[in-house]
Amino acid sequence: MKSILMAAAGLALFSTTALAQTSSDQEFVAKAASSGMYEIQSSQMIMQDPSATADVKTFAQQIISDHEKAAADLKQAAMKSDIAVPMELTAEDQQMLEQLTAADNKVPTYLNQQVKAHQKALALHQGYGSAGKDANLKTYADATTPVLEMHAMHVQKLLDTDATATSSTSGGTTAPAN
Protein backbone atom coordinates (compact mmCIF):
# COMPACT_ATOMS: atom_id res chain seq x y z
CA MET A 1 0.00 0.00 0.00
CA LYS A 2 2.81 2.36 0.94
CA SER A 3 4.56 1.74 -2.40
CA ILE A 4 1.31 2.40 -4.28
CA LEU A 5 0.93 5.75 -2.50
CA MET A 6 4.58 6.61 -3.23
CA ALA A 7 4.12 5.70 -6.90
CA ALA A 8 0.94 7.79 -7.10
CA ALA A 9 2.70 10.74 -5.45
CA GLY A 10 5.63 10.38 -7.84
CA LEU A 11 3.29 10.24 -10.85
CA ALA A 12 1.44 13.32 -9.60
CA LEU A 13 4.73 15.18 -9.17
CA PHE A 14 5.91 14.11 -12.63
CA SER A 15 2.59 15.17 -14.19
CA THR A 16 2.74 18.55 -12.46
CA THR A 17 6.33 19.11 -13.61
CA ALA A 18 5.49 18.10 -17.19
CA LEU A 19 2.43 20.34 -17.13
CA ALA A 20 4.47 23.29 -15.82
CA GLN A 21 7.07 22.80 -18.56
CA THR A 22 4.39 22.50 -21.21
CA SER A 23 2.64 25.56 -19.81
CA SER A 24 5.91 27.51 -19.94
CA ASP A 25 6.53 26.41 -23.53
CA GLN A 26 2.93 27.18 -24.47
CA GLU A 27 3.15 30.56 -22.74
CA PHE A 28 6.29 31.42 -24.72
CA VAL A 29 4.63 30.41 -27.99
CA ALA A 30 1.49 32.41 -27.17
CA LYS A 31 3.42 35.55 -26.25
CA ALA A 32 5.81 35.28 -29.21
CA ALA A 33 2.91 34.71 -31.62
CA SER A 34 0.94 37.64 -30.22
CA SER A 35 3.94 39.93 -30.31
CA GLY A 36 4.57 39.06 -33.94
CA MET A 37 0.92 39.56 -34.90
CA TYR A 38 0.89 42.95 -33.17
CA GLU A 39 4.09 43.96 -35.00
CA ILE A 40 2.62 42.99 -38.38
CA GLN A 41 -0.80 44.56 -37.82
CA SER A 42 0.53 47.83 -36.40
CA SER A 43 3.07 48.10 -39.22
CA GLN A 44 0.39 47.45 -41.84
CA MET A 45 -1.63 50.23 -40.24
CA ILE A 46 1.26 52.71 -40.34
CA MET A 47 1.95 51.85 -43.99
CA GLN A 48 -1.48 53.36 -44.73
CA ASP A 49 -0.82 56.55 -42.75
CA PRO A 50 -0.15 59.50 -45.08
CA SER A 51 1.89 61.27 -42.38
CA ALA A 52 4.40 58.41 -42.14
CA THR A 53 7.75 59.30 -43.68
CA ALA A 54 9.49 57.10 -46.21
CA ASP A 55 11.92 55.99 -43.47
CA VAL A 56 9.07 54.97 -41.17
CA LYS A 57 7.33 53.11 -44.00
CA THR A 58 10.57 51.34 -44.92
CA PHE A 59 10.95 50.26 -41.31
CA ALA A 60 7.31 49.12 -41.17
CA GLN A 61 7.75 47.06 -44.33
CA GLN A 62 10.87 45.44 -42.85
CA ILE A 63 8.93 44.64 -39.69
CA ILE A 64 6.15 43.03 -41.72
CA SER A 65 8.60 40.92 -43.74
CA ASP A 66 10.74 39.85 -40.78
CA HIS A 67 7.81 39.09 -38.49
CA GLU A 68 5.96 37.11 -41.16
CA LYS A 69 9.10 34.97 -41.48
CA ALA A 70 9.41 34.72 -37.69
CA ALA A 71 5.74 33.68 -37.44
CA ALA A 72 6.32 30.90 -39.97
CA ASP A 73 9.48 29.81 -38.11
CA LEU A 74 7.62 29.83 -34.78
CA LYS A 75 4.77 27.80 -36.25
CA GLN A 76 7.25 25.24 -37.61
CA ALA A 77 9.15 24.98 -34.31
CA ALA A 78 5.94 24.68 -32.32
CA MET A 79 4.56 22.04 -34.69
CA LYS A 80 7.74 19.95 -34.25
CA SER A 81 7.16 20.15 -30.51
CA ASP A 82 3.42 19.45 -30.76
CA ILE A 83 2.48 22.87 -29.38
CA ALA A 84 -0.47 24.82 -30.76
CA VAL A 85 0.15 28.39 -31.92
CA PRO A 86 -2.71 30.68 -30.88
CA MET A 87 -4.00 33.11 -33.49
CA GLU A 88 -5.18 35.87 -31.16
CA LEU A 89 -3.46 38.83 -29.58
CA THR A 90 -2.84 39.00 -25.84
CA ALA A 91 -4.89 41.64 -24.03
CA GLU A 92 -1.82 43.90 -23.81
CA ASP A 93 -1.02 43.66 -27.53
CA GLN A 94 -4.70 44.17 -28.42
CA GLN A 95 -4.78 47.28 -26.23
CA MET A 96 -1.70 48.73 -27.96
CA LEU A 97 -3.28 48.11 -31.36
CA GLU A 98 -6.47 49.85 -30.23
CA GLN A 99 -4.46 52.81 -28.90
CA LEU A 100 -2.66 53.10 -32.24
CA THR A 101 -5.97 52.92 -34.11
CA ALA A 102 -7.41 55.71 -31.95
CA ALA A 103 -4.31 57.95 -32.04
CA ASP A 104 -4.64 61.24 -33.88
CA ASN A 105 -0.94 61.31 -34.68
CA LYS A 106 -0.10 57.68 -35.32
CA VAL A 107 3.62 57.89 -36.16
CA PRO A 108 4.92 58.89 -32.70
CA THR A 109 2.51 56.42 -31.07
CA TYR A 110 3.68 53.68 -33.44
CA LEU A 111 7.38 54.37 -32.85
CA ASN A 112 6.98 54.48 -29.06
CA GLN A 113 4.95 51.28 -29.12
CA GLN A 114 7.59 49.62 -31.31
CA VAL A 115 10.28 50.47 -28.77
CA LYS A 116 8.20 48.93 -25.97
CA ALA A 117 7.15 45.92 -28.06
CA HIS A 118 10.71 45.15 -29.11
CA GLN A 119 12.05 45.48 -25.56
CA LYS A 120 9.36 43.04 -24.44
CA ALA A 121 9.98 40.65 -27.36
CA LEU A 122 13.74 40.74 -26.80
CA ALA A 123 13.36 39.90 -23.11
CA LEU A 124 10.96 37.07 -23.99
CA HIS A 125 13.18 35.52 -26.67
CA GLN A 126 16.45 35.99 -24.77
CA GLY A 127 14.87 34.54 -21.64
CA TYR A 128 13.54 31.50 -23.44
CA GLY A 129 16.76 31.07 -25.38
CA SER A 130 18.73 30.87 -22.16
CA ALA A 131 16.27 29.08 -19.87
CA GLY A 132 13.68 27.38 -22.09
CA LYS A 133 13.32 23.63 -22.07
CA ASP A 134 12.16 22.80 -25.59
CA ALA A 135 15.06 22.49 -28.07
CA ASN A 136 12.98 23.48 -31.12
CA LEU A 137 11.66 26.62 -29.43
CA LYS A 138 15.11 27.51 -28.07
CA THR A 139 16.53 27.30 -31.60
CA TYR A 140 13.73 29.57 -32.84
CA ALA A 141 14.25 32.04 -29.97
CA ASP A 142 18.02 32.16 -30.50
CA ALA A 143 17.64 32.67 -34.26
CA THR A 144 15.02 35.41 -33.83
CA THR A 145 16.84 37.42 -31.16
CA PRO A 146 19.37 39.15 -33.50
CA VAL A 147 16.53 40.30 -35.77
CA LEU A 148 14.67 41.74 -32.79
CA GLU A 149 17.86 43.49 -31.65
CA MET A 150 18.25 45.03 -35.10
CA HIS A 151 14.62 46.23 -35.03
CA ALA A 152 15.06 47.70 -31.54
CA MET A 153 18.09 49.73 -32.65
CA HIS A 154 16.40 50.83 -35.87
CA VAL A 155 13.19 52.00 -34.18
CA GLN A 156 15.15 53.88 -31.53
CA LYS A 157 17.06 55.69 -34.29
CA LEU A 158 13.77 56.56 -36.02
CA LEU A 159 12.28 57.76 -32.75
CA ASP A 160 15.33 59.94 -32.07
CA THR A 161 15.17 61.34 -35.62
CA ASP A 162 11.43 61.95 -35.32
CA ALA A 163 11.89 63.74 -31.98
CA THR A 164 14.62 65.93 -33.46
CA ALA A 165 12.48 66.76 -36.50
CA THR A 166 9.45 67.48 -34.31
CA SER A 167 11.36 69.79 -31.98
CA SER A 168 13.05 71.65 -34.85
CA THR A 169 9.75 72.22 -36.64
CA SER A 170 7.74 73.16 -33.56
CA GLY A 171 8.92 76.76 -33.82
CA GLY A 172 9.49 77.00 -30.10
CA THR A 173 12.64 78.41 -28.65
CA THR A 174 14.18 77.59 -25.36
CA ALA A 175 15.69 80.14 -23.08
CA PRO A 176 19.39 79.66 -22.38
CA ALA A 177 20.18 78.18 -18.99
CA ASN A 178 21.71 80.54 -16.48
Image (cartoon, rainbow, N blue to C red):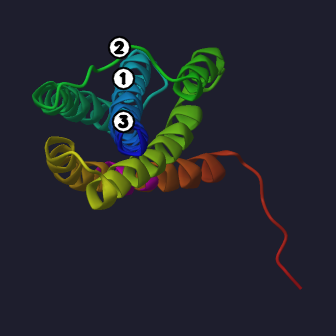
Instruction: Specify start and end residues of the magenta stretch as a single range.
Output: 151-156
Residue under label 2 = 87
Tell us which disc is closer to us: 2 or 3.
Answer: 3
Which residue occupies 24% across, 25% down? 83
Q: Is 42 located above or below residue 131 in the figure?
A: above
Residue under label 1 = 37
Q: Hey, what amino acid is under mark 2? A: Met
Q: Judge by depth and name the residue closer to the eye, 109 or 73.
A: 73
Coordinates of residue 136 in the picture (x, y in percent): 14, 42
Q: Hey, what amino acid is under mark 1? A: Met
CB atoms at circles 1 and 2 under 8 Å apart? yes
Secondary structure at numbered mark 3:
helix
Secondary structure at numbered mark 1:
helix
Residue under label 3 = 15
For marks 3 and 1, the one nearer the N-term is 3
For marks 1 and 2, the one nearer the N-term is 1
CB atoms at circles 3 and 1 under 8 Å apart? no
Residue 29 placement, left or right of 114: left
Give the Cα separation between the discs numbered 3 and 1. 32 Å
Tell us which disc is closer to us: 1 or 2.
Answer: 2
Magenta: main secondary structure equals helix
Give the Cα separation between the discs numbered 2 and 3. 27 Å
Coordinates of residue 139 in the picture (x, y in percent): 14, 49
For residue 10, the mark is: none
Q: Judge by depth and name the residue closer to the eye, 67 or 111.
A: 67
Give the Cα separation between the discs numbered 1 and 2. 8 Å
